[in-house]
Each structure stands twice: as C-alpha cells, then as structure tokens.
Image (cartoon, rainbow, N blue to C red):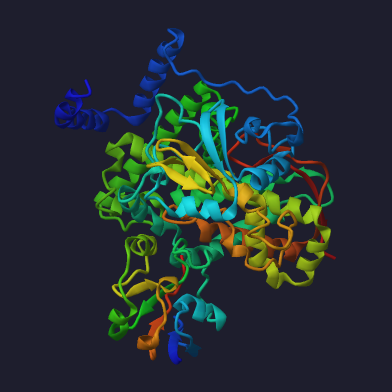
Amino acid sequence: MGRITFIEHSGTAHVVEIEAGQSLMQAAVDNGIPGIDADCGGACACGTCHVIVDEQWIHATGGINADEQGMLGLTLEITDTSRLSCQVTLSEALDGLIVRLPEFQM
Amino acid sequence: MSILTPLLEPVIQPALNKATSIIPIHWQIKGAHAVQNVKHRTGKDRPVPVFNEVPLPDVSTLALEDIDLSNPFLYRQGLWRSYFERVRDECPVHFQKASPFGPFWSVTRYEDIMFVDTRHDLFSAEPIISIGPQPEGLEIETFIAMDPPKHDVQRQAVQGVVAPKNLAQMEALIRSRTADVLDQLPVGEPFDWVQKVSIELTSRMLATLFDFPFEQRHKLAYWSDVASGAPESTGGNANTDEFFHAAADMAKQMSLLWREKEARKAAGEEPGFDLISLLLANDNTRDMINRPMEFMGNMVLLIIGGNDTTRNSMTGGVFALNQFPEEFAKLKENPALIPNMVSEIIRWQTPLAYMRRVAKEDVTLNGQTIKQGDKVVMWYASGNRDERAFEEDPDRFIIDRKNVRKHLSFGFGVHRCMGNRLAEMQLRILWEEILKRFEHIEVLDEPEYVQSNFVRGYSSMSVKLTAKA
C-alpha cells in the first residue's frame, strides 16, 4: 500500500512496506524495528512503543485520547509530537510517514 | 458534622498544615502511636486479625465460595498454584464474602486483569492497593494508591530518578557493586543467598538512589519488610508497635536527610541525582515535607518498590534454575539469553501477587456483576500462569520463552511499575556477573517463605557455589 520510515535514535533509518488497517506499532514489530518493545501488545497500557512523529505528519496521524496522553505522560522523553505507535492506524494518507524513536522506551 | 466539614475545611486545613509543618514527623507518628494505644486499651480501635498457620486443605475438597485466595499461607504451603488454577477454570471472577480482610472479588485470568488494570475510570486505586487497610493511625498517601490527575503529578515528580536515561549512567556503578558482593561470597560451603546477595544488593541500590548513609543501608530493607508486613493489610506478621517504631525511625532519618539536602541546595550546591534532590527541585513537591503523610508515603513507596520486588526476583531466579536444570544448561550455553531470562524470572516469580482496586460504578466482568464500592483484587500471580495467555506451559520456567515481556508483574496502565527498567538492569547485571564467576549455584534445601498474601518472597535460601574452572 505504501511506505513509512522509522529513524532510530542513532540515526539509522528503516523503510518498511505497510498495510492499511494495521497499527504503526504492528508495522514496526513485523519488520523487526529495534527500539519498539510493545510489552502490552497494543493495549495502550505500557508506553513502550513511543515514537516521535515528524512535525509535517502529526496531523495526519489523527487525534490523541486521554488514555494515550496519560501513558505518554509517564515518559521523560515526551515531545509535542509524541505518539504511542499502537494507537496510530495506518492508511493511505500515511504513505510516506516519518517517525523517530526515542533513546529509551520507559 | 458531615454538613459542617466542607465549611470548616478552609479553616481547619491551613491550621493543620501549619501544625504539621512545625512538629517533626517522627513526633507526630509517636503521638499517633500513643493515641492508638489508648484506643486499643479502651477497645475503640479496629481489631487486627490474627493469623495462625495451619495446614490448608486441598482445593478440590472446598466449595467454590469457600476458597479464600487472601490466605497468607497459600504461597508458603505451595498450594497457590492449585487454588488459582481451579478459580481460573471454574470461576475466573470470584467472590469471597467473608475473608479476614472483608469481602473481595478476585480477578484471575490474564485478559480480565488487563481490563481492570487499564480502566482507571472504572476502578480506583484509592485508598490503598493491599487487600486490607493500612494500620490505623498511620494511613500514608502514596501515588500508587492515587487516581489521575493527582497520581500523574506526583509520579512525574519522582520518575526521573529511575528513568532509563539516568540508569544508563548508573550501570557501571551497579556492576561494580554487584561484582564486589559476588567476590566476597564463600565458595564450596553453604550460605544464605537471601541475606548475602539479594538483601545486600537491593539495600546498596536503595542507599544509592536515596543517597542514604551507606553503612546504615540495612535499615532500608528492615523498614520495607515492616511496612509491607502489617497483618491487617497483607496478612504479614509485623506487629503494631514494631510498625510505629519503624515508621518513626524512618520519618526521623528521612526528614534529616531532606533538611540536609535542602540546606545544601539553599547554600547553592549543585543538586545530586538522588530521589530527595529531585523532589526538592520540582515545584509540586519541594515542600512535600510539610505534608507528612504524603512525604512518608513517597518514601515508603520507593523503599518497598525497590526492595521486596527485586530482592525476591534475585532469589527466585536461582531457585527457578535449580528446579529446571536444563534451563541452567541452556543459559550457560548462551548467555545472550539473559535479558529474556530476566523477564521470565519476573513472570515466574511475580514478586508482588496482586494490586487491589475499588469499583467506581457497577461493572460486569466475565459474567459477574461487581458492585460500586466492592474491592477488586487483580491477581498478577495467577494471570502470569494463565494457560490462555502463555501457550507454552506457564508453570514451567523457560528462559527463551516467546512474548514473555507481556507478563503482568509490572502491572499495566498508568500505575505500571516506575522502576521496571532499573529492576531489569539489576537482574541482568547480576546474572552477567554470576556467569563470569560461577559454574553452578546449588540450592541445598527448600527455601523459607515469607508470610503474606502480597509479597511472594523468600526469607532464606541455603546455597552452595561452584567456582568456574
């Protein structure tokens, strides 16, 4: 369907093919992107799939609810464009998306 | 009174705060102790349950409604697995109406626990997370037992001390202290692993995090044991006098430490990266010492949080590898499995058996209706052995188990363990350093277990080391 780019904290970039309907976290896990733990398996309950969305793309990733905000509040590395990747659903509108990984997952 | 309270609140609260900021906390605790003693003599205190150990029946002989998962001897007597398995299979959301801690619901399956843990809108962590209440007269305030938004503010003030970024800087120090402890162990003769390794290492770590006088570090472990061992809270065997004495001693020492750091900060000294310095640096918490129960609550939470859990995982790992010797062989063959094994140790041990919630409204869960105000206990120890969530025999210890990071031991949702990365790092370093030095750690006898429905711990475990050739 399209491609997205994960950039590790070290700067290493990974370009992966995506399918519409899957979560951004699942795309990372399926492609073995290092630095996404996703301990809770996508329940918005552990905060270990934190990504920092490229500013140009933040609106396209959709709204952020109180639960996600609450979990993100538990990490010191939170930024204005932080998201939990399990809460971002991929669609054609996100073809070309760029996200960066924090140095650590909490 | 109930009508007057809100009206008087603006008058009473500032006066109380003023008083509590002038009178040293340990005097206040002694005062509370005296009040409790008077109440006790006059029969006006809340009765404290007494637990005498008797052999517990085989679970198959009990009616479902008579199963009491809060019994503090279930773990020690090795019966917890069969009790929880039956409840998971036959009545996964289970009501016990007449326990020594009062009525409570047990949630025993992985998926249901995940539901309760992540729905803080439906289930409150207040006023406390143990099955029973805190000892009367010493009800501390701690963010593990607060709901958002108050929880978030308090946690954010302290989480920096154990954030991964700072842990990376501490790794070399933790490693050298671990190496030091291991190098002093006797080889080829029996000794108690709990005392010499697990307690020693966790006390050193806590002393570092608090910048607490190193030579007095064993007090931290002692305070933690007493604080989590109140019979009315967890079925432990600490007594009320001991509890108050420990609390007063802790309050005195921690207040002194706080004042000392405050003075150094006022004198312009660069703040350290210890917990109290962090609290002093944050606008929301810099005057926490003037709110004694909140101050004590945070100290107790971080001392217990950094103590029992890691300590019992340090012992549990050795015990597990002895019960499953083929896994010990696998580990020696492939030390790169250590990080995954650490998660498996934390799952297999589940050092804290549960967290308790209170339903904020009526909730239907797995066919049962939990009423508003009912106590709900999420049994992590059961969820971590749920065959529905862990396909490969969950009672087995498998160091390369797939998806083991989904274990429940750290909890999920906003109360997820703040020190999870520190715990993982401590255990990883311990095992890396053990494998460098020792060929084998033999467990010589059945370990001694702690009396508690909350802490799944070992009070002693005799072992013998074989040096590496």
| B202 sits left or right of A6 in the view | right
In the image as oriented, which residue stretches furthest toward the top?
B42
Determine whether A1 is above or below B298 in the image.
Answer: below
Determine whether B83 is above or below B440 in the image.
Answer: above
Residue B357 vs residue B296, the one in the foreground: B357
Residue at 69% from the left image edge and 72% from the top image edge: B336
Residue at 34% from the left image edge and 25% from the top image edge: B28
The quarter holding residue B423 reads: bottom right
Q: Position of residue B406 (x, y in %)?
A: 58, 62
In the image as oriented, which residue stretches furthest toward the front?
B367
Asked if one can make out residue B256 in the rendered structure from this viewpoint, the answer is no
Residue B261 vs residue B27, the one in the foreground: B27
The quarter holding residue A6 reads: bottom left
**Which image quarter is the N terminus of chain B in?**
top left
Asked if one can make out residue B263 in the rendered structure from this viewpoint, the answer is yes
| A81 sits left or right of B253 in the view | left
Q: Position of residue B75 (x, y in %)?
A: 68, 38
**Which image quarter is the C terminus of chain B in?**
bottom right
Residue A15 vs residue B102, the one in the foreground: B102
| B128 sits left or right of B351 in the view | left
Q: Position of residue B174 (x, y in %)?
A: 56, 59
Q: Position of residue B231 (x, y in %)?
A: 55, 27
Residue B230 vs residue A72, the one in the foreground: A72
Residue at 62% from the left image edge and 55% from the top image edge: B346
| B450 sits left or right of A43 in the view | right
